[in-house]
């Protein structure tokens, strides 16, 4: 009897322990396994196409580029070299000013150099080029013909004859007339004083895409020499650098660099045009026909093509078979040479 009672007690005790164990398991924390999620591999970000481009270089930009160009008359007398600001010019027009000395019209739109000069006097044909680009025209002095045009308010302009010592500053390291300079800040200051608008850029030139530029054809021409006179005071040369795909410029044997930064002038297009020149006074000043068009050379990527030039609403553009030839994206240098003796005798091309 006692054995039965003991057996019943043991069974009840074991059942009690089992129940407590189950309750403890229920009350304990339940571990939940994290669901396995498959992450999608990250796709490379698409290259954003720049929504804007600079009208004189074709180079893309993330910000609006519709700002007014500035055209500055830059001295090219040997005593004015090296000049300041030319490395940042989108286009430079090099034309005979008087005698056998050329002068530059440097056009700034995509870049704004701190200092520009030496600034020199105006000529009528440079004024017409600046007007065709809707540019603010900067000069120090003028020929009689240019003075009449400027006084007639044909073009918005700032002239050192009015602002010498204020907007224009004289360098102490050079002698007049090779020492007049203007900062870009003072150009904007002068424009504000005169209430000139600095909005609305020039009409855009036509440009190759970067891929199209790789397939430019033509005769090999790694070096081009331009002989303006027997004296050689303004003779220039361009050498193609295959490593950069750009042209270096030289005045005689001296490379054209910036006076302040020592950076070289590097160019993507060399456009040499032939135009009729006619002497108009004893100083050797000229009237130059930049309207009628004519023969031209266009050098790009170490190649040269014989083309023609055309004045398209004030802009000088290369054409072939009546169709405008695109420029390589970047900077352009335009040389204007007389029809007598002409392109073939003035320009020497070397492979």
Image: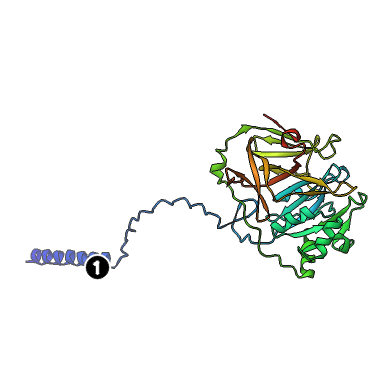
- Residue 62: where, in percent of width, then height? 59, 58
User: Front-most of 65 and 320?
Assistant: 320
Quadrant of the image occupied by residue 33? bottom left
Residue 264 appears in the figure: no
In the picture provided, is 172 more to the left or to the right than 307? Answer: right
**Most extreme residue toward the left, as rendered?**
1
**Image quadrant occupied by the N terminus:** bottom left
Q: Nearer the viewer, residue 288 or 133?
A: 288
Q: Is residue 158 left or right of residue 321?
A: right
Which one is in front, 341 or 307? 341
Q: Compared with residue 109, is residue 272 higher up or lower down, i.e. above or below? A: above
Total numbered circles = 1
**Relative image position of residue 316 (x, y in whole percent):** 67, 50
Count neighbours of disc 1 (C-alpha within 10 A) and say few if under 14, some if 14 to 19, many if 20 or more: few
Mark 1: secondary structure:
helix
Tell me the colour scheme of the image: rainbow
Answer whether residue 163 is visible to the viewer in this image.
yes
Q: Quadrant of residue 2?
A: bottom left
Query: In the rendered view, does 167 fall on the left or right side of 308?
Result: right
Q: Choose top left, top right, bottom left or bottom right for residue 217.
A: top right
Which residue is rendered at x = 30% and y = 63% of the image? 30
**Residue 313 location (% of width, % of height):** 65, 56
Q: Quadrant of the C terminus?
A: top right
Q: Residue at x 89, y 53 (%)?
A: 171
Q: Position of residue 185 (x, y in %)?
A: 78, 61
Q: Which residue is mark 1?
A: 23
């Amino acid at each position: 009897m006692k054995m039965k009672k003991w057996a019943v007690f043991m069974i009840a005790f074991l059942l009690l322990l089992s129940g407590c164990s189950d309750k403890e398991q229920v009350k304990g924390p339940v571990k939940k396994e994290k669901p396995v999620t498959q992450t999608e591999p990250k796709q490379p970000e698409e290259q954003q196409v720049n929504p804007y481009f600079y009208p004189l270089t074709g180079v893309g930009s993330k910000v609006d580029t519709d700002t007014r160009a500035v055209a500055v008359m830059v001295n090219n007398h040997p005593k004015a070299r090296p000049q300041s600001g030319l490395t940042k010019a989108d286009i430079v027009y090099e034309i005979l000013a008087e005698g056998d000395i050329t002068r530059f019209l440097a056009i700034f739109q995509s870049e704004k150099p701190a200092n520009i000069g030496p600034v020199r006097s105006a000529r009528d044909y440079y004024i017409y080029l600046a007007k065709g680009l809707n540019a603010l025209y900067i000069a120090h002095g003028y020929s009689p013909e240019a003075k009449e045009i400027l006084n007639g308010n044909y073009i918005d302009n700032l002239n050192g004859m009015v602002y010498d010592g204020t907007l224009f500053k004289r360098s102490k390291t050079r002698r007049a007339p090779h020492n007049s300079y203007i900062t870009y800040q003072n150009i904007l200051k002068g424009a504000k004083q005169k209430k000139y608008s600095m909005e609305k850029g020039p009409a855009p030139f036509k440009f190759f895409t970067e891929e199209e530029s790789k397939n430019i054809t033509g005769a090999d021409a790694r070096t081009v020499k331009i002989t303006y006179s027997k004296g050689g005071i303004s003779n220039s040369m361009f050498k193609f650098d295959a490593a950069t795909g750009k042209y270096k410029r030289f005045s005689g044997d001296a490379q054209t660099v910036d006076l302040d930064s020592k950076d070289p002038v590097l160019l993507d297009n060399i456009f040499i045009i032939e135009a009729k020149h006619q002497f108009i006074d004893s100083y050797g000043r000229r009237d130059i026909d930049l309207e009628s068009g004519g023969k031209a050379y266009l050098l790009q990527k170490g190649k040269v093509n014989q083309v023609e030039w055309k004045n398209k609403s004030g802009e000088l553009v290369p054409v072939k078979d009546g169709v405008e030839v695109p420029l390589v994206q970047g900077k352009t240098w335009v040389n204007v040479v007389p029809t007598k003796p002409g392109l073939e005798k003035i320009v020497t091309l070397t492979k």
